[in-house]
Amino acid sequence: MIEFSRVTKRYADTAALAEVSVTIPDGDFVFITGPSGSGKTTLVRLLIADEFCDDGFIKVDGLHLVNATEDQLRAHRRRTGVVFQDYGLLAERTAYENVAFALRCLNIEPASVNRRTREALAVVGLSDYADAYPEQMSAGMQQRVAIARAVVTRPKAILADEPTGNVDPKNTVAIMEILETINLHGTTMVVTTHDPLIVEMMQRRIILLDHGRVRLDDIGGYRV
């Protein structure tokens, strides 16, 4: 379970998040939405302990992120897959190598690396593109490689920050269907987006941020 309790994060004199209280149960699928500058990316950075809140607390599976040791934070990050808008792929590595790299960093034995990498590429529909380099793939395909890299470590939760921001409508639908399939297998899914069409299409829980505050926490379309 993910729990934000009266979380505030400031940059200089500006509150990127202000007294945010949200609970996300295991296995939930949640959209964090709102206009640019509303605090969506800040929320993701706090969740992966890339930054820490100034007030309040964040707990993930009972672990207080602010008070956690470095070892506990490393374990937390290993349990959390992250997908960014800009893909973050290594240009000199193939799709297979980009996904396998995540497992090699965890010292997984080679046979398991190969099996799990190919399974992850199959999940995102890229089994036939294992040997392709990022420059040989479309934006949508690159994002699917990034999703495979996130899921290959078998995380408990995936945080996807604007995962469809750089892809066309057809690939947007494909990516959301992939994330939904992953969620149906039990992975908690937290997706930030500023695109109301995605939110309406999926009809999942919405947490709407505006100027760092929660303005709506609901299921279905916007009702503000």
Image (cartoon, helix red, strand yellow):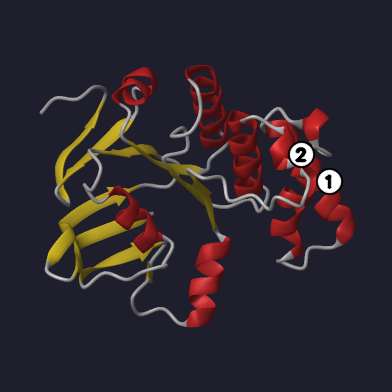
Residue 102 as seen in the image, left or right of residue 70 = right
Residue 8 as seen in the image, left or right of residue 40 = left
Residue 65 as seen in the image, left or right of residue 126 = left
Q: Amino acid at mark 2?
A: Glu
Q: Which residue is mark 1?
A: 115
Helix, strand or loop for disc 2: helix
Q: Position of residue 88 (x, y in %)?
A: 58, 51
Q: Position of residue 28 (x, y in %)?
A: 40, 40
Q: Residue drawn 46% across and 32% down? A: 164
Contact (Cβ within 8 Å) of mark 1 with mark 2: yes
Binning the other alpha carbons within 10 Å of mark 1 as few (below 14), some (14 to 19) or many (20 upward) gives few
Helix, strand or loop for disc 1: helix
131 is higher (above) or lower (below) than 50: above
Q: Residue drawn 71% across and 66% down? A: 106
Binning the other alpha carbons within 10 Å of mark 2 as few (below 14), some (14 to 19) or many (20 upward) gives some
Q: Position of residue 4 (x, y in %)?
A: 26, 58
Q: Going by the picture, which residue comes out furthest to the front? A: 135
Residue 45 as seen in the image, left or right of residue 90 = left
Q: Residue drawn 28% across and 50% down? A: 23
Front residue (pair 144, 167): 167
